[in-house]
Image (spheres, rainbow, N blue to C red):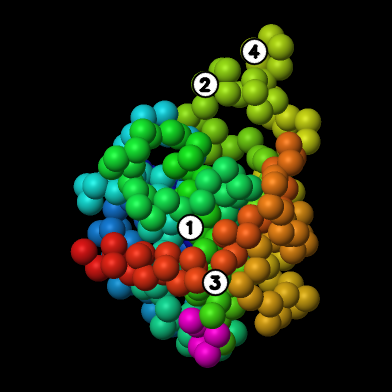
Amino acid sequence: MISDGSNTDSGERAAAEIKASTGRDDVQVAHVDLADRSTIDAFVTGWSGPLDVLVNNAGIMALPELTRTPEGWEAQFATNHLGHAALTLGLHDALAAAQGARVVVVSSSAHLMAPVDFDDIHFDSRAYEAWSAYGQSKTATILFTVAMAKKWAADDITANALHPGGIMTNLQRHLDETQLRFVGAMDDQGHPLDVPPGWKTPQQGAATSVLLAASPHIQGVTGRYFEDSNEAIVVTEPGNGMSGVAPYALDAKTADRLWDKTIRLLQR
């Protein structure tokens, strides 16, 4: 279990709950900051043995101001995509050693908001917009998954992406009151809702990740995008419900382009 952020408190709490409910004492917690390559490199270097399942779940959303990493990368793209890509690439040999490993990538229906702007990924020229930045970062995670599924098939590694659904977590910490009202996460009196209508509990939101990580029904399935525990339909015009997957997120040529761009960025 990896705890992303400034400390491992949340990871330790989750580990304690797992130990208490399962009776297992072999749950470990490690610190990785996906915007800090040194912590990713340290985790990868410290890993030993095969890795059966890797679930890339961490992320940040809708940063109100343009924020950059020390490399000059836009923070949402750097964290949601490049950090996970660096971690996954670094763990390739461990995944291959498992002989049937699965990589599960938590994306979002927000990918429907924006494709990857290869001409200006990091908002060096265009005006920054929080949701466009978030959307493109989540599109990138799907494209990287599509490319990974093809490139690592010979290593018996499968990779699938998913939308977990709307879930009230710390992910919404950057939304202001107006935005929370807009997404239905706050009542008319300004009180936040634990589970807004149409949203999911954390347990319900984890269901599709668990399916892709552990279900025998997904054996051999790779390079797909799921939601609500089913493969999502391809949509050219997303409706109000933000359901389905955009064709540009599954395009094989674009996926290869994103893979190559990612490798070049990470080799700097």
Q: Quadrant of residue 23?
A: bottom right
Q: Earlier in the sequence, mark 3 or mark 2?
A: 2
Whether residue 120 is visible, yes or no, is: yes
SS at badge 1:
helix
Residue 24: image x %, image y %?
61, 66
Is 72 above or below relative to 152?
above
Is 257 above or below relative to 183?
below
Q: For the residues carrying marks 2 and 4, which lies nearer the camera in this image?
A: 2
Which amino acid type is shown beneath numbered disc 1?
Ala
Circle number at residue 252? 3
Is 183 above or below relative to 38?
above
Dot 3 crowding, Cα within 10 Å, few <14, some 14–19, many 20+? some
Q: Main secondary structure of the magenta part?
A: helix
Q: How far is the residue under mark 3 from the one under mark 2?
A: 37 Å
Q: Which residue is mark 4?
A: 190
Q: Front-most of 219 and 82?
A: 82
Q: Earlier in the sequence, mark 1 or mark 2?
A: 1
Which amino acid type is shown beneath numbered disc 2?
Asp
Circle number at residue 140? 1
Q: Which residue is mark 2?
A: 176
Dot 1 crowding, Cα within 10 Å, few <14, some 14–19, many 20+? many
Q: Front-most of 132 and 80?
A: 132
Q: How far is the residue under mark 1 from the one under mark 2?
A: 26 Å
Q: Earlier in the sequence, mark 2 or mark 4?
A: 2
- Horizontally, is 174 left or right of 167 in the view? left
Q: How far is the residue under mark 3 from the one under mark 1?
A: 12 Å
Q: Which residues are magenta?
A: 151-155
